Image: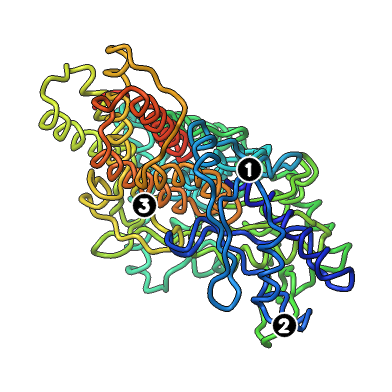
Amino acid sequence: MLALMNELGALGADVLQKALGPDIAVGDVLSMVRAARPELGDLQCNAAMQLAKATKKPPRAIAELLVAGLHHPAIASARIDGPGFVNIVLSDAWVAAHAGKPTEMRQIGAGQRVVIDYSSPNVAKPMHIGHIRSTIIGEALKRVLRSVGYEVIADNHLGDWGTQFGKLIVAWRKWLDRAAYDASPVDELVRLYIKFTDDEKAERAALGVAATDEDDAPKIATPLIAAARAELVKLQQGDADNLALWREFIAVSQREFDRVYQRLDVHFDVTLGESFYNDQLAATVERLKAEGLAVESQGALVVLFEKDRDGAEMPPFLIQKGDGGFNYGTTDVAGMLYRMKTWQPTRILIVTDERQQLHFRQLFATARRLGITASLEHIWFGLMRLPEGTFSTRDGNVIGLEALLDEAERRADVVAAESNPELDAAKRKEVARVVGLGAVKYNDLSRDRQTLVTFTWDKALALTGNTAPYLQYAYARIRSILRKAEADGFVPGPLSDLSATERTLALHILGFDEAVETVAKSTRPHFLCDYLFALAQSYSTFYANSPVLKAEPAVRSSRLTLCATVAETLKRGLELLGIEVLEEM
């Protein structure tokens, strides 16, 4: 549909340019959108109102010029409504000819490269329900952008460096349970981290000192914090034993991450953790200093920003601590420079939660001053909380991501057993896997990503309403109809003589490319979810009013094609969201 809308927009611009003369800047393409209401038509153009002031003509007079000259095989009729809206009805022949085959995606990203940074779990910690949003949103955006022609580099920026490793090395040497580690390495590392946190808190209470963090002065550090800092310094200086432990932590963590990613069908092109940029940090700081961006402030190096138009001032961006140490800001500037040098992207997307908005505003402003011209986009999303509040690994009140996926499959298995008891065990297990994982992913993707999500099992694993299982079942039901038709020797044929419900469904099919491009441009996957749900509902209305297998031959062939195209569109859309379909449920 988008190709036609663009074609009609270009034709309309040419019509008005010729009618209004060279002194009026009409533009190359008039804006064509879906009509606001079905009774108005299929497409709508409001260019007449936009040009009224420049031409000093009434909008309806301009609209009359457009209607008089807008001739195209796809147009059945065009009329003027209201102050000057031009509403267009497409011909049934055009709709039938194009809705009976898969929609071709415009390659709007051809020749452009995008880097997407998403998921980014921390080493030595299990992936929990909070990681689902970045992982699933990033994967969906990667797939959508590739479908419209972009070359995409998917980068998993692991949290594999920093103060937590000093703490973990101390805890490892003091309290490691080797048998527990051999049985479940990351769970034991989490236990050690929590024990360090609890014991350090007890030390603070005993010594009567305030809470400390990695940036506090050493003179107020508890013995455990002091020990952790010492081990961190040794690690940073290349101590062989500490490096060996650090590499061990990364290896066991990566194995667990890979298992989860395989289960979720999530794939990266590169995995470059924070440590990858260590040898680039000093040079990054020197470049910031040489270009006059990094200045000294209270012993540290920061980037300062000018006030914006409203007089607000962004806080200084710390890029080197007073003790000479580097931080996340340093690493992220180095990462930005590396990505530009290595891949020359036109867009860089970084998917994290809302708490990092200030950090990325500072980072992007710094990057601009370094001469980076790529589109820099922070794809932030609302936090996921438990009903009782926030969660953290440190407090030990997290729900593991694998536990979520296990429970999703268990609940889907129960539903599959109840709804289709004839399925054998192997098929039922596969249905449970696909439906359970689909429910979890779609539950996240179907919401505007910037909304806060309060996690409950029932919402996360809902199987009815605007959910993946509903769409998966719609696909499976259509495939069942097509198999029955094939068994009876019935074959799809050209769409013809569309009824009102058939035409409505056909127009829904033709909106697939609009939905996908909307996601590519807005970076909000829920628009595709909304489209797929509306398509499935439109199909349900069609099926309730239009017999397929019992229709007379010509009508049956046409409706079989309509069914097949809906199934293919549902499958393509769900695949872009990272969700599988089943031939039988």
Q: Quick one: label 1, few (<14), some, or many (20+) residues within 10 Å?
A: some
Q: In this view, does 517 lie to the left or right of 411?
A: right
Q: Mark 3 points at which residue?
A: 393
Nearest the eye: 216 or 453: 453
Q: To which quarter of the image does residue 148 belong?
A: top right
Which of the labelled discs sits on residue 307, or is there none?
2
Q: To which quarter of the image does residue 342 belong?
A: top right
Q: Please indicate, yes or no, whether residue 14 appears anywhere in the rendered image.
A: yes
Name which residue lies at 73% across and 75% down: 51
Q: In this view, does 480 lie above or below 54?
A: above
Nearest the eye: 151 or 342: 151
Q: Where is residue 313 in the image (x, y as percent from the top left)?
A: 67, 82
Discs 3, 2 touching: Cβ within 8 Å: no
Distance from the alpha carbon under mark 1 to that under mark 3: 22 Å
Q: Position of residue 154 (x, y in %)?
A: 60, 39
- Regarding mark 3 in the picture, which secondary structure is present there? loop
For the residues carrying marks 3 and 2, which lies nearer the camera in this image? 2
- Regarding mark 1 in the picture, which secondary structure is present there? helix
Amino acid at dot 1: Ser
| Mark before the other along the chain sequence, 1 or 3 | 1
Nearest the eye: 124 or 425: 425
Nearest the eye: 118 or 140: 140
- The C terminus: image quadrant: top left
| Mark before the other along the chain sequence, 3 or 2 | 2
Q: Is residue 551 above or below residue 195?
A: above
Q: Where is residue 245 in the image (x, y as percent from the top left)?
A: 51, 34
Which of the labelled discs sits on residue 275, or is there none?
1
